[in-house]
Image (cartoon, rainbow, N blue to C red):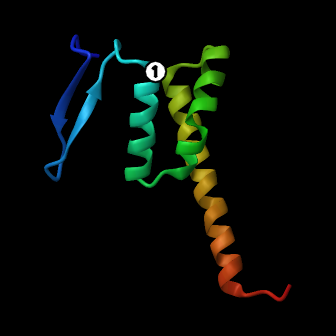
Amino acid sequence: WKDESLSTHAEPGGCSAPRLTHESRCSSVDVYVEIYCKELKMPGLRRAYAALAREAGVHSHSPIQYLAACLAEEMESRKASRLQAYTQQARFPA
C-alpha cells in the first residue's frame, strides 16, 4: 500500500487504473474489485469475493487461502456456466 490515498498507474494497453491504498474506504475497494472482475470476465469471483473475505476474516485464513478460495469459486462458476450452455445447445425436449 502506498501513502497516498489514491494514485493511478498505467496498465498494459494504455489504460490507467486507480491503485488503492490502505487509507481508501472499503466501499471504494469494493467498487474497484467489481470493476476488475467485470473487466477480467470473472463473474463467479465478482459474486463471491465479499462473502469469502468475511469468511476468511472469521476463520483467520491467510491471503493465499483467501486467493485459493476465490479462484476455486471462479472455476466452479465457469464449470456451471459451461454445463448450462452445453445443455441449452443440446436442445433437450422439455
State which quarter of the image contains the C terminus: bottom right
Q: Which residue is mark 1?
A: 26
| Figure check: 73 above or below 68 | below
Q: Where's residue 42, x and y in %? A: 48, 51
Give, as a three-letter code, the residue at label 1: Cys
Left/right of residue 28 with respect to residue 81 in the rendered view: left
Left/right of residue 78 with respect to residue 10 in the rendered view: right
Q: Where's residue 69, x and y in %? A: 59, 35
Residue 25 occupies which quadrant of the picture? top left
Residue 33 occupies which quadrant of the picture? top left
Residue at point 13%, 49% (across, down): 14
| Figure check: 39 above or below 4 | below
Residue at point 53%, 43% (across, down): 46
Residue at point 69%, 80% (across, down): 88
Crowding at dot 1, Cα within 10 Å, few <14 / some 14-19 / many 20+, comes out as few
Q: Nearer the viewer, residue 46 or 68?
A: 46
| Figure check: 34 above or below 29 | below
Left/right of residue 74 with respect to residue 3 in the rendered view: right
Q: Where's residue 47, x and y in %? A: 59, 43
| Figure check: 85 above or below 33 | below
How many tags in the picture?
Answer: 1
Residue 3 occupies which quadrant of the picture? top left
Q: Nearer the viewer, residue 71 or 12?
A: 12
Left/right of residue 13 with respect to residue 43 in the rendered view: left
Residue at point 59%, 19% (across, down): 61
Give the secondary structure at mark 1.
helix
Q: Nearer the viewer, residue 38 or 64?
A: 38
Q: Where's residue 36, x and y in %? A: 38, 43
Q: Nearer the viewer, residue 1 or 20?
A: 20
